[in-house]
Amino acid sequence: MTVAVDIEALRSRLAALEAALREKEAALREKAGIETALRESEALRRIALKGGRMGTWCWNLRERLIWGDAAFLALWGFPAAEEARPLSAFTDRMSPQGQIAMHEMVTRAIANREEFDGLLEVVAGPARGRWVRWRGVAEAERPWIVNGVSFDVTEEHRFDERLRASEARQTFLLRLSDTLRLHTDPNAVIAMVTAALGQHLGAGQVTYAEADPSGDHVTVTRDWNDGTIPSNVGRHRLEDFGAAFIAELRQGQTVAIPDVALDLRTAPARAAFARISVASLVDVPLVKTGRLVAVLAVHSRAPRDWSPHDIALIEEVAERTWASVERVQAETALRESEGRLAADLAGMRRLHDLQSRISDTADFEAALDEILAAAVAFTKTDRGVIQLVANTGETLEIVRALGYEPDAPVIERFRQDSFTEGCELARVRRQQLVVADMADIPGFAGTPDGDLVAASEVHAFQCTPMISRKGDLVGVLSTQFRQPHRPSDDALRLVDLLAWTAANYIARHRGDEALRESEARFRQFAEASSEVLWIRDATTLEWEYLSPAFEAIYGLSVTDALTGDTFRNWTDLIVADDRETAAACIQRVREGGHATFEYRVHRPDGGLRWLRNTDFPMRGPSGAVERVGGVGQDVTELKRVEAALRESEGRLRTLMEGIPQLVWRSRDEGDWTWAGPQWLAFTGQSQEASHGLGWLDAVHPDDREASLRAWDEARPHGRLDTEFRVRRASDGPYLWHRTRSVPVRDPSGHILEWLGTTTDVDDLRRLQEEQTVMVAELQHRTRNLIAVVRSIAQQTMTQTGPGEDFREQFNARLGALSRVQGLLSRAQSEPITIGQLVRLELDALGARTEGHIALEGPEVLLRPSMVQTLALALHELATNARKYGALSTEGGRLAVRWFVKESEDEGRRLVLAWMEHDIGHSTEERSSRRGYGRELIERALPYALQARTRYELGATELHCSIDLPLTERTRKVSP
């Protein structure tokens, strides 16, 4: 219904307009002739029909009033009204430029008695942004009255603007493309693009920045400025300009920001933008393989609304710029490559020609001169020397020089005493040495040699060792420069090739006989080798050489194999299923590749052999493959061993899966590769979940760190032995398990993998804990019993009256037993060592504070069963030393030393030597009676511990030795 009303209203307005036009036609026909009036009427009719939303108006120039119909007023955003509106109501909604243009247009039309036609933009009010077309003409009788029509041409204007912008954009891009094609330098391309784009957009600055490989910084290599923004060439940290903004760039998104101070992406970094004088921007990133590579940025010093046309143009320019830069870089690289290739080809031709000439000449010195001249030419200098290794092989001697006066001081100085920081260093390192500036050699300037070299105008040099194909260093090829200079890499490579050519020539010249001898030795080696060595012609595939081992492996004589079609002779011996593979590998080598392949052959005697061939191309001077060489190895036995190994591994896996322990395989650092079914059933893990460090998920969280530490210590110790708790999947508790593993090593000792078991020791740990408690209680009771015995003995001795010596010795021996019981009570957690026993007895006497005691020996663990008897023996020795021996006088010295010896017959034994010097009492006093201590050493120890003892007492010395087994051995008892 609304549409019908609008159409009807439009028809009414059009009818009224036509009536007015007819009246105007009549008046014009009378005044200017019928043809002119008709043309005007037709033009107005076309305008009316084209305009659609058309309004009529009447303008009184004298009163400065405008009357308009509802359609006209609506075009300007006014409500309909019958009364006229002041001209200012309309001019207030025009831009200043629009007001001036309107005034000039109307004034000119009235002066010339003609119609005016123009466009105005509504810049204020509800109709802001609308474009209105005005067309009118002044009345003939009343020229201050102007009548006309207006209609909305906003869409038409926008279309025209887009069309003009597109045409301008295309024109700019075409000119840009034409200009880009003229440049061959990437920097020139960037400079031209930034300037052209900045001027076209009226921007303040256009920059081109390249991102570092890390992506954290960009470097502005070029920028264009209109004078309002200073140059920002340099390196900038991306994160300084807002993380969100940079994140969009890294994602490859164009970022347009009218005002960096108001945009949420850049507002936190407004200080950074203020530092570079940028208030508005459009940044277009280049992202390759997920990495930010470059950014083309357009900046404005003031806030700016960037139109879609601006952004599209900048993106298009960025794409064309990158394409052009890549093209120019590729062309530059191609030109440089072609230049290097041409230089390489020229150098290679010279090398080839030189090699041909010197190989035929008998004049050794002339050949060296040619070699030196080529080196000087390659490095673009005029000086050089050749130094050859003397017969000793340890010194260099200058044999040829170019560019120096005869007997030049610098040549004579270093003729037989090579410069240590130059050619001599290159000889020792066997590497090419380049010194671009002699001033860089520390401590050389100002020395006599430094002054001599400087006076000779030598300021840089290169030294290339001449190493033959056999690896023999025959000398050094060196060129020098009169100014600091570094030759190009291509030149140094050519010199390296030249040095190699020269080395081979010199080695050949010096040792033709040695070379023939070497060839003879090689043939001798080939003929003695158990492997087949052969050479084929790469074109015909016919054998040129075949070593005698062929007959032993293939069962066919070398003579028969080299008769007729030798390639066919070989393939006929190969099992039919393997021939295609063998032929394909030979073809690959003919094309320049390498091949290692295995195949089977039927010997004429019916035997089947496995062979492994390693074939390689042999190239001629031109680089083409001229021959195919190969080594054939009989691997029949290896195949048999591999099959047996696979069978053995199968049996091992069956065994591992059948034992009750939790079995697994691992790489270093606990990186499991397989878990046995026992582990999977116990923990509930899948095979995949247990791999790597996944097995730790089944380990108690408190034990995981200790488990990993045990793995860290396993490799240096060559074994893994640790305990941790593992969760039982069936009911959830963590049970203690002991894990042990040893590495599987290859013949060279390298660890291939670890095989291990995890055994349930939860019940054993509980029993051990109970046993520990029981042992501790037993030891406690033993010590209490000793205390009771001592008390009873003390009371008895008081009543019966034994001597004080008896009382002292009895208490001391009970004390020794008590101390031993204390050690034994802690033996489970603190194993007892021989050193601990010795120190314990000496400390009980307070003797170790004295400076004349020497103890020496390793910490050797003792079995608990031997500790008590051995401790009593040491107690007797220490007590006697305090009473009569070395500890009883100031001049006495006591030395106790022990060590472990090992033999196949007796196993590991502990040997302890107790030696006292300068003893204080006479021999008669100490040996007046055979005491308990000596009886214990000479009789009790051999009987109880199967020890061998020796007790020798001299006038001033005591030597006692105890030699007893460290391992349990069955004691033979006489019947």
Image (cartoon, rainbow, N blue to C red):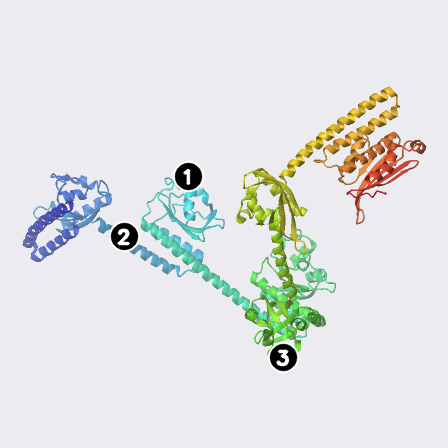
Judged from this view, the residue extending furthest toward the right is 924
Determine which quarter of the picture holds residue 701.
Answer: top right
- Whether residues under marks 3 and 1 lie with C-beta atoms below 8 angstroms apart, the answer is no
Residue at label 1?
Answer: 268
Q: Amino acid at mark 3?
A: Thr
Vertical relation: 956 (above or below) 608: above
Q: Earlier in the sequence, mark 3 or mark 2?
A: 2
Q: Is residue 711 left or right of residue 517?
A: left
Q: According to the image, label 2 marks what residue?
A: 162
Q: Secondary structure at mark 1?
A: helix
Q: Position of residue 126 (x, y in %)?
A: 22, 40
Q: Which residue carries the number 3 mark?
A: 563
Q: Secondary structure at mark 2?
A: helix
User: What amino acid does circle 1 point to?
Assistant: Pro
63 shown above or below 504:
above
The amino acid pointed to by label 2 is Arg
Q: Judge by depth and name the residue closer to the eye, 501 or 618.
A: 618
| Residue 693 showing in the rendered view | no
Q: CA distance from mark 3 to mark 2?
A: 87 Å
Residue 953 seen in the current view: yes
| x and y percentages locating residue 285 in the rendered image | 41, 50
